[in-house]
Amino acid sequence: FGDKAFVNASMTSQTPMMWSNLRTTSLFQDEDQTKRVISLVKKVPYYSGEQGLIVINVRSSSLYDLIREMKIDGVSSLCLADSMGNSFEGMGRKCAQAVQDQSDDTILKSAYTDWTLHIGMKHAGLFAYVSTFSFVWVLLGFVTIIGGIAAMTYISHRHYRPLDQVMNRISTF
């Protein structure tokens, strides 16, 4: 049995249910063809786990394909990683760690699986340009409103005397 070491390690674990990190496994011990999987391990019965384990292996390539289908090309980059930082994308790949001050990446971490989803903007420069352009229009709108109020005040004060004189002549008749 090719997964004997993993099963033995899972039997000694104290948690009744857990997700493993990315690992390679083969069906038989002498088999050359290995697959990258993550495993859901549940002890049977649930509280004591004395009778055995239920192990469900999920190919990492299947999860990567699911993430790739969700990705919108040209807008964002998605990377799913296990608790060790290994990417589901392929062997030896790591998700780029987002530095708080230098990146606009969003990092979501699951408390249940301890996996991390990195979501980043590929065209952050274009987004910043469009965002600034929108800010310019808002600023231009405020300047226009303030300028309109100032112009109405100036015109009212400038033409106050002639209007007052016309009103006085009308009232004298």
Image: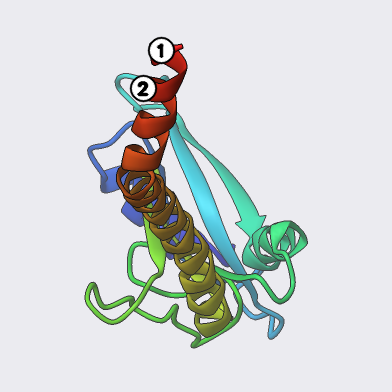
The N terminus: image quadrant: bottom right
**Pointers 2 and 1 in contact (C-beta within 8 Å):** yes
| Amino acid at the residue labelled 2 | Asn
Q: Which x, y percent locates residue 114? A: 35, 51
Q: Is residue 24 left or right of residue 35?
A: left
Give residue 156's position: percent from left, percent from top. Answer: 37, 42
- The three-letter amino acid code for the residue at tag 1 is Ser
Q: Residue at x 39, y 59 (%)?
A: 143
Q: Position of residue 25 (x, y in %)?
A: 58, 70
The answer to which of 105 and 143 lies nearer the viewer is: 143
Circle 1 residues within 10 Å: few <14, some 14–19, many ≥20: few
Residue at horizontal 22 percent and vertical 77 percent from the top: 101
> Is label 1 in a helix, a strand or a loop?
helix
Rendered position, 21 above or below 171: below
- In the image, is 166 to the left or to the right of 60? left
Q: Residues within 10 Å of mark 2 (few under 14, many from 20)?
A: few
Please report the residue visible at 34 percent of the width from the left and 77 percent of the height from the top. Answer: 103
**Location of mark 1 (residue):** 171
Helix, strand or loop at label 2? It is: helix
In-front residue for pair 33/36: 36
Q: Can you identify the residue that label 2 sits on? A: 168
